[in-house]
Amino acid sequence: MRVYLSVDMEGVTGLTDPEEMRAGGRGYERGCELMTADANAVIGGVCAAGARTILVNDAHGSTKNLRIDLLDPRATLVRGPGKPMRMGQGLDSDHRAACLVGYHAMAGVRDGVLNHTWMGKEIQNVYLNGEVCGETRVVAAYAGFLGVPVALVTGDEAVCAEARELLGDVETVAVKKGVDRFSAELLPPRVAHERILAAACRALERVADFAPYRVEPPYTLGIEWNSTAIAAGCALIPGVRSAGPRHTEFTTGDFGQIMALFGIFAMIGGQVACGSGIYG
């Protein structure tokens, strides 16, 4: 049985500070260790339930965060920038289940720890077929497009609630309870990892209970940017249209193009924002 892990960082056990998730930031190295430990807990759980092939995708920021030297040797790791499918890189229809590890709530959720959607400074909101959505929905929809169900989501309480509302009776593990965007009540790593391992095992044991999350095509990705300059730059991409001074839209029948477009948006958005010398 093949299992896929997409591992983000904002929802990882013990982390609340953006510095802990940025290379060179205060606490970053420890953050990478905690991120790897959360992934290892999932790997342990799915292996206990019969998984034989586990692919882990480093889905945060630089995508160079997970510690390969600390990763459970029963898994392999996709690492590094330039991945066309970004947070879904390596996922295919041969996987029996997908696990979203260390995920966070969508932008604007008051008690969502480090809440944002894809780009914390450049993007105000993301919409899929007219409905506001977060990264959980985007990646679950890509998995559903490939026929793969999401079986487990870990992160803070807010993203777990988001996942259950979206996916139904999916297994979730809340490793922290948000107080505000940069503060939370935390579980000790040992407790969190025990809960993650147990939930991952349950998720795979009851994988037949989960159906792929389907969004009906065509798929329209809408982005509400924080900058008119970024919106104008992204609207130059073939197929992307301007839907307002700070809004762009893109429609396709292939959800893989949605995933790939996020990578292009990140490059353009980052360059325009840095070039302007201002945010806001």
Image (cartoon, helix red, strand yellow):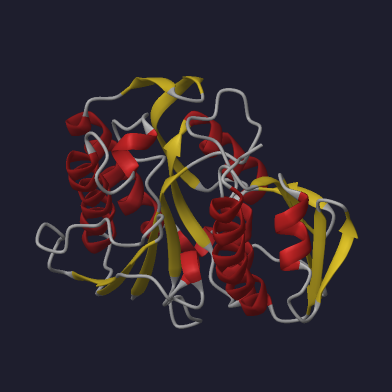
Residue 205 visible in this rendered orientation of the protein: yes
Residue 127 in view (yes/no)? no
Q: Position of residue 55 (x, y in %)?
A: 31, 72
In the rendered structure, the answer to whether residue 235 lies left or right of residue 116 reads: right
In this image, 135 relative to 114: left or right?
A: right
Q: Quarter of the image containing the C terminus?
A: top right
Q: Residue at x 63, y 72 (%)?
A: 261
> Which residue is depicted at the point 18% across and 46% down?
33
Give the residue drawn at x 44%, y 76%.
83
Residue 187 percent location from the top left of the image: 29, 24
Residue at coordinates 42% horizontally, 76% vertically from top-left? 82
Specify the quadrant that holds the N terminus: bottom left
- Above or below 84: residue 121: above
Query: For residue 194, what is the image quadrant?
Result: top left
- Of 265 and 9, which appears nearest the observer? 265
Asked whether, in this view, residue 245 is left or right of residue 139, the answer is right
Q: Does 271 appear above or below 31?
A: below
| Residue 89 occupies quadrant | bottom left
Establish if 89 lies above or below 269. below
